[in-house]
Amino acid sequence: MSYVLCLDCGATNVRAMIVDDHGSIVAKASQPNSTDAGSENPEFHVWNTDRIVSQLAECSRKAVAEVDAADIKAVTITTFGVDGALVDAQGQQLYPVISWKCPRTAEVMKRVAQYMPQGMLNSISGVGAFAFNTIYKMIWLKENRPELLDQAHAWLFMPNLIAQRLTGEMYTDRTMAGTSQMTDLKTGDWSTEILSAIGVRKDLFPPMKDAGESLGNLLPAACELLGVPQSVPVISTGHDTQFALFGSGVGENQPFLSSGTWEILMLRTPAAQLDAEDYAAGATVEYDSKGGLLNPGLQWIASGIIEWVKATCFNGESFDTMDAEAEAIAPGCDGVKLIPDFLPSDPVPGSIQGLVLGRTRAHIYRAAMEALTIRLRQRLQKLEKVGGFKSQDLLLVGGGARNKVWTQMRADILGIPIRISNVSESTVLGASMFAFAGAGVYESPEACRDAFGITYTTVNPGPQQAAYANLLAE
């Protein structure tokens, strides 16, 4: 038996999972994750890398203790995109990791035309205008802490910060670079034009590594920290979305929805044609886990809103209770509507409309799911235009896939089958496929995916499809 240890840093949890060479998660441990307040402003959000590494290590030791650790062949690291930090030549951070949640970059994005027009940024990088993009963190640092950019030896994205502490090496996962809005979509490298415009030197970024390449072997201290008895390679993966795509089994030109704190609707395709209207609608293009493919997509906050409804209206009650109450509400929620714009960077704040006597918390919850599903429908139509295809079904993964009421609603509103990947941890399994290939256990990630085997559960449009069609036609 061979194993891969996957360290997965998410916005709400950090986890260590051990995957065997048949695709089973044989051990795991997790701890909650959250941002800290920035020192300059209590409204700022930063990640505490020291704490995150400590938590990952504790989770790793617990998970590793459940298997024969001598059979661990590789370690890999996945995290959310865009976030990272400046470090010195020894890998010491010069400033905390500015979180994608932090509002400080919203104002930077509004005036980015001082450096380069947003349309030009979009067309060069392929990445849409999101206030959390790495470029706006760089500009904020340039404007507020320029001495740090002068002192810095490198910029490391979150998984590479962690990998540097484990290996002593500095590299950049390509899938992370593709979220920055500072690369050139045509070349796959850093854009000298963009970096010159914002005044950031190119040598700040370590060499890029493709998924499946080694970032270096574990240092002796890292072996002890993780509970791994021998030095093994740390294999490059990176941005969790790309590996959820691959791990779900999605093929080319098949729409894929990762439903979590954010909903990320994407496609694996050799080319993507986007125009200014597409970018205005929130479209973006990232680098696929496999070279030669791109991931055009759209993203919006989703389960983050559902969690807000749970905390605000249900006082800690279970999702089973919430779903049972929502299922009893008719399509259209008796006129209750939710506008799901909850981020500081959204131009107009979100709202709940149609609240009158007799409406309940279940109306608000169902209205949130309906609003997010209608947004999905609009964005899927946009993705079909960008990719030049027509959806026959939608592949769904993530925590949102476990919500049966919401999944049925998606099928009814979209009018197509929803195929739920029975891979419960598509990001971790997708990353492990590249790690097994990088460690030589399988000849390629595709061969590993075939060996794992992936099955699906299909949810077809149901009796409420007609009611939703009428509501959408109004």
Image: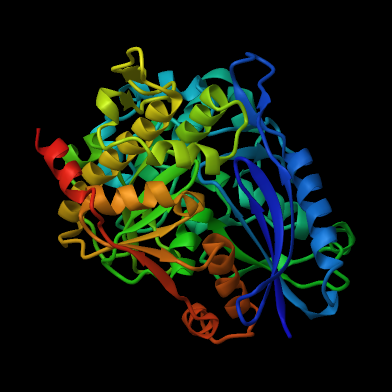
Spot the residue most to the left: 473
Rendering coords of residue 94 (x, y %): 70, 32
Q: Nearer the viewer, residue 321 or 390?
A: 321
Residue positioned 26% across, 37% down in the render:
331
Is 125 located above or below residue 454 in the figure?
A: above
Q: Nearer the viewer, residue 136 or 63?
A: 63
Question: Is 43 on the left or on the right of 182, as rendered?
Answer: right
Give the quadrant of the N terminus: bottom right
The image quarter in which residue 154 lies? top right
Q: Is residue 285 visible?
A: no
Is 222 located above or below residue 107 in the figure?
A: below
Rendering coords of residue 282 (x, y %): 28, 38
Question: Is 353 on the left or on the right of 247, as rendered?
Answer: left
Question: Is 204 on the left or on the right of 58, as rendered?
Answer: left
Question: Is 373 on the left or on the right of 151, as rendered?
Answer: left
Is 273 located above or below residue 192 in the figure?
A: below
Residue positioned 49% across, 46% down in the render:
260
Residue positioned 44% across, 47% down in the render:
179
Give the quadrant of the C terminus: top left
Rendering coords of residue 344 (x, y %): 44, 21
Residue positioned 46% across, 32% down in the render:
305
Q: Nearer the viewer, residue 347 or 322?
A: 322
Q: How is the image coloured?
A: rainbow
Is 450 located above or below residue 314 in the figure?
A: below
Q: Is residue 230 visible?
A: yes
Rendering coords of residue 254 (x, y %): 28, 65
Q: How many marks?
A: 0
Q: Nearer the viewer, residue 196 or 289?
A: 289
